[in-house]
Amino acid sequence: MEECRTLAVTLETVTPLFLGGADPRGAPELRPPPFRGAMRYWLRA
């Protein structure tokens, strides 16, 4: 059986991300959808 590999990367945004969470008055959190959207946009460019 093949062993699972893990890749850890450090990324820095140079454009704003639209962040939000379940609590609009709380601190914004980085969730997968805005990150995926930004990556999809930049990889298509």
Image (cartoon, rainbow, N blue to C red):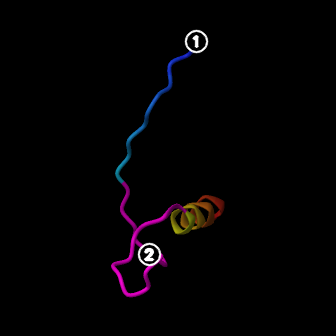
| Residue at the (66%, 61%) spot, across then down | 44
Where does the image place residue 42, in percent across and percent down from the top left? 57, 64
First along the sequence among labels 2 and 1:
1
Task: Please say whether residue 30 is one of the residues in the magenta stretch.
Answer: yes
- Measure the C-alpha gap from mark 2 to mark 1: 41 Å
Q: Which residue is mark 2?
A: 15
Helix, strand or loop status at disc 2: loop
Q: Which residue is mark 1?
A: 1
The segment highlighted magenta reads 11-32
Q: Up-down: is 17 above or below 30?
A: below
Look at discs 2 and 1 and give the one toward the viewer: 1
Helix, strand or loop status at disc 1: loop
| Residue at the (38%, 41%) spot, across then down | 8
Task: Please say whether residue 36 is one of the residues in the magenta stretch.
Answer: no
Number of on-image labels: 2
Magenta-drawn stretch, dominant element (helix, strand or loop): loop
